[in-house]
Image (cartoon, rainbow, N blue to C red):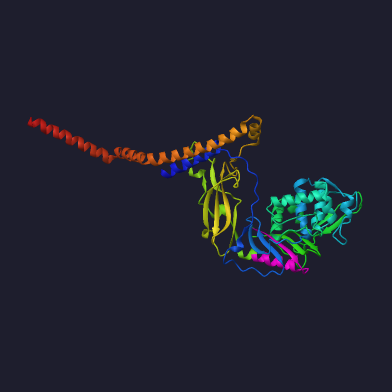
Amino acid sequence: MIKRWTHSVLAVLLVLITILAPLPVYAEVNAPLWDMTMISNLPKAPSVAAPSAILVEAKTGAILYAKDADTPYFPASITKIMTALLTIENCSLDETVTFSYRATHELEAGSSSIARTEGERLSVKDCLYAMLIASANEVAQALAEHVSGSIESFAELMNQRAKELGCTNTNFTNPSGLNNPSHQTTAHDMALIMRAAIQNPDYLEINSATSYSLPATNKNPQSLAISMKHKLLASGDLHYDYAIAGKTGFTQLAGYTLVTYAVKDNLDLICVVMGGQASTDHYSTTRALFDYGFDNYTIHNVSESDTEYNLNNSMLEDNSFLGSNILSLSVSDDDWILLPNSVPFSALNTEFAWGDSVSGPNTLATVTYSYGGHQVGQANLTVKRDEGDVFSFSTTKASEEDAEDSSGSGQSESSWFSWKWVVLAAAIILIILLILFLWPWIQRKRRRRTYRNSWVYRKKRRKKIKMRLSKKRRKGRFL
């Protein structure tokens, strides 16, 4: 009975939170990378010849290996990952790009190109394939001008987006990665950029292609077949079965650079290598780091591994006033934690905290997981209605617009929400105190009622009545 009361009260509180205390909409926060390399007794990583490298699990943001990953290096053509991401975010794929004189002529001698000319037209989609597969520099410049009007304005957009993604040591000056002393980034920052890019389905589809046929244009009557330069993706001796997408880079100033995304056993790994001096070392380094990650680490879905915080409608009666299949409180299905194979999920320490402005609009609370004194991940507790339908604590857009239209209502509405929280907290405390105070009394009353209705109690009662009557009769004889 106590269990039934507890779950019913919790369900009522969830409803009160949903109805009475909507939270404001928060801006999306890009999750930082988790540095697991500080944890002791991790599996031994392979030696890396390149000056700078990093291995990251994309879903969790866990850094499994890092070498000089925060030192700026010249990126060369891996810059085009950011150019492609911004183009997809700001354009429709069927838009038409017209090549300018500057885009087709301000190029370094011998740099990658597909020989486009001034006035030539290609769709954005075709341009993206040409840039990511053939690494065409004039295409990168044409896309930059198409998106922002000029290469300089596009560079500003690149740096702005880099900061939004959490990059701290990045400065882009052009969309192609051609030599410029100020054009620098880090392996860490490029991992963040690639992590954002692979979450875009259009980017992933284009960047995973190993070949493409560019159609005839207004200046070129023949189609042009292009092939992937990334040797871990393309067929050949260096092909890596689990590689999905990536970008190569090379200039005399930058050396060999490489970004690669690979998937195996639910692990999504990103490897970035910068400053390589030999033509194949960046490939062997990437392969070795991928094998290290896939062989020594396991990813855990938190909702499946930690059920301590799960509460759903199965705990409520079918005839509850809340109805069936209305509420559930559970760990988000999208939260993952990466651990060495030797560390079970049960070995993690947990810390519970109520949600705040960083947690997100649908998050009631956050659970932080740590191992060996180091934080390894977080999971959000969300309230859901029906299967897969998350209760939105945020106010709707319409309600926000109504609030803006009402003169002076913005400040008072915000104050009203604050008072709602105070009233709600007081109501919760009052309910808990009432339950603690009244429950023992209710239980005593219930036990007394049950006992009085029992056969034993009735038998004893009849016996007492007979004894009283017998006493009265005996007294009557003696009188």
Q: Residue at x 53, y 45 (%)?
A: 329
Q: Does residue 143 appear anywhere in the picture?
A: no
Seen in the image, is 155 located left or right of residue 189?
A: right
* Residue 211 seen by the camera: yes
Q: Is residue 70 magenta?
A: no
Identity of the residue furthest to the left in this view: 478
Q: Determine whether, in the image, residue 164 is placed left or right of residue 230.
A: left
> Number of labelled discs?
0
Question: On the image, which quarter does residue 235 sit in?
Answer: bottom right
Is residue 426 toward the left or the right of residue 450 in the image?
right
Q: Which residues are magenta?
A: 267-292
Q: Position of residue 443 (x, y in %)?
A: 35, 41
- Counting from the top left corner in percent of width and height, residue 103 is at 86, 52
Task: Identify the image quadrant of the C terminus.
Answer: top left
275 inside magenta stretch: yes
Farthest residue toward the front? 182
Most foreground residue, 474 or 339: 339
Q: Which quadrant of the figure contains the N terminus?
A: top left
Q: Where residue 357 sits: x, y (%)?
A: 59, 45
418 or 36, nearer to the observer: 418
- Which residue is rendered at x = 63% and y = 32% of the image? 403
- Percent across and percent down for residue 309 are 51, 49
